[in-house]
Image (cartoon, rainbow, N blue to C red):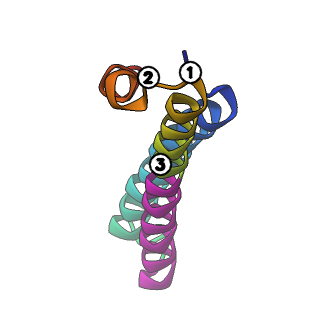
Amino acid sequence: MRAPAELDDVAVGEDNLKVSKDNLELTRQKLEVGVSDNVEVIQAQQAVADAQLDLINSELAHNVAKLSLARAIGDAEERLPKLMNQQ
């Protein structure tokens, strides 16, 4: 069992974080060769921080959806540990 929408949000969050980190690395490289400035690096760092927060929020929503599913099905106490280990 999975909560499809929330799981998709987690996957998107992971992808966004990877893209943000890649962009930060490229921005740092541009700074090293003098094509960029510190402002762009700081903006890229902020984008990484935002992506990390978005991922955390997506993972939280996914886990809340699992809890809601377990409660709706019944026997949440027994089913929840199994659901929490699934991705």
* Secondary element at image label 3: helix
The residue identified by callout 1 is 2
Sequence-earlier tag: 3 or 1: 1
The residue identified by callout 3 is 17
Of all residues, the one furthest to the front in this rendering is 75
Of all residues, the one furthest to the bottom in this rendering is 39
* Secondary element at image label 2: loop
What whole-number distance in Å separates the C-alpha atoms at marks 3 and 1?
22 Å
**Figure check: 71 above or below 60:** above
What whole-number distance in Å separates the C-alpha atoms at marks 2 and 3?
18 Å
Q: Given contact means CB atoms under 8 Å apart, are the residues at marks 3 and 1 in contact?
A: no
Question: Residue 22: x, y in percent?
Answer: 44, 47
Tell me if residue 7 is in the magenta stretch.
Answer: no
What whole-number distance in Å separates the C-alpha atoms at marks 2 and 1?
7 Å
Instruction: Give the foreground label among 3 and 1.
Output: 1
- Helix, strand or loop: magenta stretch: helix
Tell me the kind of residue under disc 3. Answer: Leu
**Figure check: 17 above or below 45:** above
Question: Residue 39: x, y in percent?
Answer: 49, 84
Q: Nearer the viewer, residue 49 or 39?
A: 49
Tell me the kind of residue under disc 1. Answer: Arg
Magenta-colored span: 37-57
The residue identified by callout 2 is 87
Q: Given contact means CB atoms under 8 Å apart, are the residues at marks 2 and 3 in contact?
A: no
Q: Nearer the viewer, residue 86 or 26?
A: 86
Q: Residue at x 46, y 41 (%)?
A: 63
Q: Given contact means CB atoms under 8 Å apart, are the residues at marks 2 and 1 in contact?
A: yes
Question: Residue 2: x, y in percent?
Answer: 56, 21
